[in-house]
Amino acid sequence: MSINTKITGVGSYLPETIVTNAMIEDILDTSDEWIIKRTGIRQRRVVKDETTTYMAVEAAKRAVENAGIKSENIELIIGSTISGDVSSPAIASYVQRTLGCENVAAMDVAAGCTGFIYAMATAISLMETLNKNTAVVVASENLSCRSDWSDRSSCILFGDGAGAVVIERSESNSIYHPVLHAIPDTDDVLYVASSKYAHPWSKDIATDDCAIRMDGKKVFAFAVDAVEKTLNELTELCGDKPITKIILHQANNRIIRYAATSSSYDKDQFFVNVDRLANTSSASIPLAIDEAAREGWLKKGDVVALVGFGAGLSYGGIIIEWAI
Ligand code: COA
């Protein structure tokens, strides 16, 4: 028998610095017009002094405050990032340390831009397995420092920020139908490089490349297919309790528009903030949830499909019933 859970708090952090397409025109052979036409992105937030950890902690603090709980009541923290300040420990461990939660399980999941969906599924599963009452799921990304600013086909896509939710046990269930998938990325069409040292017994050479590498066209084809399949799957699983709102990973407005045309849903049912925040990888969905909740776009009782896709090639979705 599975436990009942719901989201009781949401929070986010965005750096103040805004980089517009016009500012990128000054450093690269690109144009505002090209970027808007191909992606819908007009601007992105980028860190000045903030780290991935700092943004994660701020977003988690705001979610905890929004839930009206005490940090010491948190029993599980699941983080997600493709741009950690360190490879280890997890951002979840830094959130634990800063929030002062003594007795928690803390770990990150690595599922590329689908990370928040995987983290939500992990959180509700572990709450049941480990018999926990309260969890924080936090995703934080500093992609401006993982972008190759000489590669005009990718650096224009990304932005920075963090989002978090608090999940608590409840009488009725408001988080359900997690669907997680992955198909092998045999051509390495999407990955984040990692710097490394060489050692005397290896043919490997040292590299300081840590940028996002991508074959845009192939990733686009994968993304629209993954979104279509996941939305169909969630629609079927929801049966006679129809999905009312959809929050897709905010990668590109063309992908969102494509999903709206290829599905039975109206374009107004899709939340969009990629025009202002660009692609913030695994942070994009909780950032969108927070903005949609604050703006009143999300209404109590909404049945919301969250759908993500990214490196791996991972994809998946989950349903949340908005209950705040
Ligand atoms: N400004 C101006 N021209 C650019 C450019 C830029 N920023 N980036 C690429 N171009 C040029 C290319 O050099 C190419 O020129 P050419 O025809 O002279 O060779 C032309 O524009 C078309 O490039 P192409 O790569 O075919 O464009 P595209 O239509 O596939 O759009 C993306 C590129 C990246 C916007 C698109 O493929 C995409 O959105 N992919 C998905 C990316 C994504 O969402 N990744 C994250 C998933 S989690």
Image: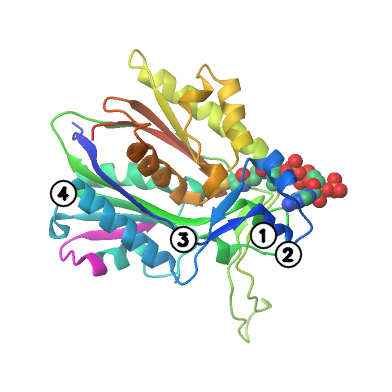
Question: Reading the chain from its start, which is encountered first: label 3 or label 1?
Answer: 3
The three-letter code of the residue at mark 3 reads: Glu
Please count the marks in the image: 4
x and y, in percent, of residue 42 in the image: 61, 47
The three-letter code of the residue at mark 2 reads: Ile
Check disc 4 and report its element: helix, strand or loop. loop
**Does residue 286 sit above or below 194 in this rendering?**
above
* Label 1 close to label 2 by CB (< 8 Å): yes
Check disc 1 and report its element: helix, strand or loop. helix
According to the picture, the residue beneath numbered tag 4 turns out to be 68
The three-letter code of the residue at mark 4 reads: Gly
| Distance from the alpha carbon under mark 4 to that under mark 2 | 45 Å
Q: Which mark is residue 27?
A: 2
Query: Image point 36% across, 52% down: which residue?
Result: 12
Quadrant assignment for the N terminus: top left
Residue 272 vs residue 162: left or right? right
* Label 3 close to label 1 by CB (< 8 Å): no
Query: Image point 21% across, 37% down: which residue?
Result: 5
According to the picture, the residue beneath numbered tag 3 turns out to be 16
Residue 313 vs residue 9: left or right? right
**Does residue 140 sit above or below 41 in this rendering?**
below
Quadrant assignment for the C terminus: top left
According to the picture, the residue beneath numbered tag 1 turns out to be 23
Q: Quadrant of residue 23?
A: bottom right
The three-letter code of the residue at mark 1 reads: Met
In the rendered image, residue 98 lying in the magenta stretch gets the answer yes
| Distance from the alpha carbon under mark 3 to that under mark 4 | 26 Å
| Distance from the alpha carbon under mark 3 to that under mark 1 | 15 Å
